[in-house]
Image (cartoon, helix red, strand yellow):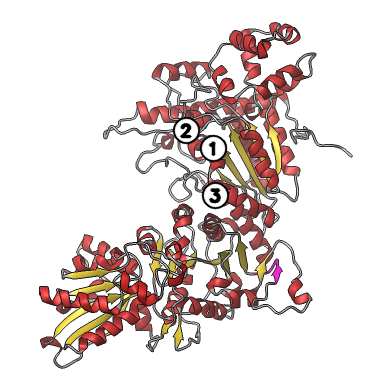
Amino acid sequence: MHSPPEDGIDGISTIAPQDLEILQAIERRVLWLSTYMIHHANKIRPNPDGLKVGGHQASSSSVVSLATALYFHFLRPQDHVAFKPHASPIFHAIQYLLGRLPPEQLQQLREFGGLQAYPSRVKDSDQVTMTTGSVGLGSGATIFGALAQQYVEHHFQRSPQGRYIALVGDAEIDEGNVTEALGEARVYDLDKLWWIIDFNRQSLDFIAPEGRAMETRKLFEAKGWHVILLKYGSTQETFFKKPHGDRLRDWIDECPNVEYQSLCRADGAHIRDVIVNWHGKRDEGLAQLLGEMSDEAVKELVLNLGGHDLPRILEALSTAERVKGQPVAILAYTIKGWGLPIAGHFENHAAQLTHEQIESLRQSLDIPLGREWAGFAPDSLEGQWIRRFLEAQQESAPYLPSASQPVPSIHVPAQVGTAFRPMMSTQEALGRILVEFSRVPGVAERTLTLSPDVAVSTNLGGWISKMGVYAPADRPNYFAMHNIQTLVRWQQSTTGNHIELGIAENNFYLALAMFGLSHEYNGEVLFPVGTIYDPFVARGLDALIYGVYSGAKFIFAGTPSGITLSHEGGAHQSIVTPLVGMGLPNLIYFEPAYGWELECILCWGFQQLLDRQQGKSLYVRLSTRRIEQVHLESTPERRRQVLAGGYWVRDYRGEPDYATKTRVHIFATGVMLPEALRASDAVREDEVYANVINVTSPDLLFADWLRSSGNGASSYLDELIPSAERGVPAISVIDGHPLTLGWLGGALGCPMIPRGVVSFGESGTIQALYHKHHIDVEAIVEGIARLLVKR
């Protein structure tokens, strides 16, 4: 049986010498444009505020060869690339040469209205398909993009099947979310997935320790990936075959990363001396072989790593195309700053070339003076190559979805008729509502749930039993086969509508994001609904921000929430999650008290997901505490109020003596409604009218008030609290941070006491914890008394 080569490259792909020269010319132009783009932004363009503009010339140049081979030889229109964030100028230079970016845009890097610092699918104009920026997240998102594509293929028989490719810096592998994400590729048998790792052995501050390459390789292999080692260049491979030439490979393998990086700064004579006298003993055979070469040739040989050698890169990519049944990781050795005078310097991450160095680079790359922004003439060899490549792409490209394609006509009802028990928690209501959604034609087949190993404990059991669990192939339910009773029917198949993830909240949000972009990537709208323990919302916050920044449309429930999860203790009791919901753009936070409110919110939320331009993602904060379901008819007007941010639950304004009585307002959210209503009853005995306003979305209420206050228009808050009620003392209560509702005092111009949780919780009964944190009935009544005394 044929044994694969040690580096995993089969060497089948070849390229004609004249074609190689054309690609190398394109490579040099990409290097120049990316470097000059950063130079122009920092040292030529006017800078009125005097702040550093930034950019990463060294981090860009390390991937120039990899990106050239990918974008001018292998990439297909249906492929999606998460481009290394610190190398975004390379991406923009390539898009310019491909005719997808006007030349003036190159001069607007990191400028208002121009190209973003890091690739953004919603803010850049040159076909960024996957947002990158917070390192590690864009690469991790490719895994879940491939999963969403496979899911759509199984559920809707959709094609084409694009590849999800991450061009990722080696330091990004250190991010914890990367290790968490890699294993999901194996779990779901994803094989249209490539990671090309720019292994330049440098991060921002230091050079990677020894053994990092082997650790990285073993990591990917242990997670079920096919690893291709792209270490040695063509010139090195040829040299190794000469008598004594293999000793150069031994030296490269043994040389510490720090020493190798330092030798990038040395001349060829010094490098030769170091190699032949390795370990303090002169290697005469290797000395003779290297002695036949000029100093410049010796340096070029030693620095001829695989990640900068186009023939070897093309072979590696060709090998990756033939790998089936596994994701592929190409571990490409590169030099940070390759082709630049700052190559290999351990402080080159943010370093920038001087005017003199730029001028020298311009001359060495044959860029005519005054033509610094020039691309390739259409009739040039390079221009003809690019035209033929684009024509071949167009001819072979199947139907491709786009963000502008129409959304299918799907009717989402305003309510689904869920039956709620008299005493129920919002978490229980969620499970019942989803089961009702499974009966709605056109909606059920597009709805999927996701959970990081908390599906059953967040009440998804009914949905899962009815809709099944997604798997890359049908799998037997051994419990059912052996007549063992289970509460949940865990049937796994290619048609299941639940995605079960491991305990990794970053994976959870990245998966929500990529399923939430299915319309744009795969041409099929999906309704992704996730459940996560509310205390762990913040654990995946970076990935949540990634999802909403990328424009994804999804819904997730944080449940159970607050110190109401009383016996679980402080580690499982969320405090700041309402502020997270209020603070994130493109995300609307709701905290319903009653099941019918949640049904109304979810129906509206699904409609939001259909609005691919203006729609928002939703976060619903739920509880396990069962409360009495106050009977209110779900009329269109009541639903409008719920979706606008709140409504009056206890309203004394119709009382004959209302105008002459002492009155206060109690603003309450979510699970605190029973306390607010009981406090209202208690002070009624003292002839105080305490109206109770149920704030269903502090987020929407605040955003609408803020927007209106800026332009002088009226807001829903003006309708909710009309002028006759302004100035009335108020108290707010939430099982979360009091700032969530505390802004109402200033907005309404009234004295106000905000009640909430400002310190970590602990184990205990609900009553004990509510009392300690001053959100119980007694605390609300005491607050009302203080307000009235001050008045």
SS at mark 2 in the image = loop
Q: Does the segment drawn in magenta span residue 492?
A: yes
| Residue found at x 75% / y 67% | 475
**Mark 2 vs 1: CB contact within 8 A:** yes
Residue drawn at x 45%, y 63% as measured from the top left: 535
How far apart marks 2 and 3 lie (CA) works out to: 19 Å
- In the picture of the structure, the residue carrying the numbered disc 2 is 204
Q: Is residue 157 left or right of residue 773?
A: right
Q: Which residue is mark 3?
A: 177
Query: Please, is residue 421 above or below residue 190 in the view?
Result: below
Please give the residue where the numbered disc 1 appears in the rendered image. Answer: 171
From the top left corner, tell me how far across and down residue 262 is, in percent. Answer: 54, 19
Question: Residue 700: where, in percent of width, then height?
Answer: 33, 67
Q: CA distance from mark 2 to mark 1?
A: 9 Å
Q: Is residue 651 visible?
A: no
Q: Which residues lie in the magenta part?
A: 491-496
- The N terminus is located in which quarter? top right
Q: What amino acid is found at the position of numbered circle 3 in the picture? A: Asn
Badge 2 amino acid: Leu
